[in-house]
Amino acid sequence: MRKRLIIIAIISIIAITFSSCSKAEKANETLTSTKEEVEESAVSVQESVMVEKIAEEPAVIEEEEPMGAAKLLYQGHASIRIVTAEGKVIYVDPFIGDGYDLPADLILLTHGHYDHTQTDMIKTKNADCETITWKEAIKDGQHQTFEYDFVKVEAVEAGYNKNHSVNDCVGYILTFSNGVTLYLSGDTSTTKDMESMAERNLDYAFFCCDGIYNMDMAEAIECAKLVGAKHNIPYHMIPANNGNGFDQAVAETFDVPGKMIVAQGEEIELN
Ligand SMILES: [Zn+2]
């Protein structure tokens, strides 16, 4: 009898232990799942806050992107390539240097001399590429303006020396979509137009200054002062038959306010 009681007592103890163990496990499980639920609901609260935030965010007012700057590559002599902010490619007076691989959208020629008209150097042209020469640029004695959606081209006077007649030579003022202006003198001596250019506060101006076919350096300096652009750059500084399109020593003597020297093959941003 006593033995039986002891066995029953032992069985009961084992049963109680097991049951309390499983209770504890259950409690643990419950705790864990509650914790998960809390975490989950925290995430969903966070998500809903974010959704609300996004919904509450005031509509972003699209500010107009300021137009980028055109890039000007000085190829040497009077040869210039410009890539506008819109990616349009303009060549002026192709003759020397590198960088003729981009398809042309616009070709500008200032006059008919060989050192300004080597259009065959331009490898490809886009389908709607236009070429403006001194012939289109002067109609009935009037200098013409050409409007494109990537540049405005104004023909201005050039010439006034024994090699260059004002009737069949032009310079150009280009205005880009960011408002920046660029004057290219073409082959010339002092023109009547130059004085009136001063009031336009031009940004960049290139002046020829070779002193053999065109005005010399001293006159080019006077012209630059007359025009009064912010940046003044010498070009066409040595005769074309020299074979080089640039001479640093000559360029250095272009002593003007806002003097800027752009070497052959150098690219600048027009801003
Ligand atoms: Zn020339």
Image: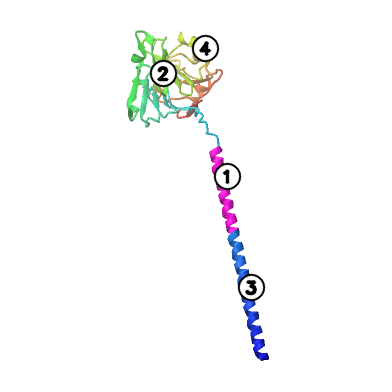
Specify which label sits upstream in the sequence, 2 or 3: 3
Specify which label sits upstream in the sequence, 4 or 1: 1
Mark 4 to mark 3 CA distance (whole Å): 99 Å
Q: Which amino acid does label 1 sit on?
A: Val
Task: Tell me how the rendering is colored.
Answer: rainbow
Dot 1 falls on a residue whose secondary structure is helix
Q: Is residue 161 above or below residue 255?
A: above
Instruction: Please report the residue visible at 57 percent of the width from the left and 44 percent of the height from the top.
Output: 49
Mark 2 to mark 4 CA distance (whole Å): 18 Å
Q: Is residue 76 magenta?
A: no
- Nearer mark to the viewer, of 1 and 2: 1
Dot 4 falls on a residue whose secondary structure is helix
Instruction: Please report the residue visible at 52 percent of the width from the left and 12 percent of the height from the top.
Output: 199
Q: How many neighbours does mark 4 have within 10 angstroms: few (below 14), some (14-19), or many (20 or more)? A: few
Q: What residue type is labelled 3?
A: Ser
Q: Is residue 52 above or below residue 134?
A: below
- Nearer mark to the viewer, of 1 and 3: 3
Residue furthest out toward the front: 1
- Mark 1 and mark 4 in contact (Cβ < 8 Å)? no
Disc on res. 49: 1
Report the residue marked by disc 2: 153
Mark 1 to mark 2 CA distance (whole Å): 56 Å
Specify which label sits upstream in the sequence, 2 or 4: 2
Mark 2 to mark 3 CA distance (whole Å): 95 Å
For the residue pair 52 and 270, the one nearer the viewer reads as 52
Report the residue marked by disc 3: 20
Disc on res. 199: 4
Which residues, given as a range, are shown in magenta? 35-56
Specify which label sits upstream in the sequence, 1 or 3: 3
Mark 4 to mark 1 CA distance (whole Å): 59 Å
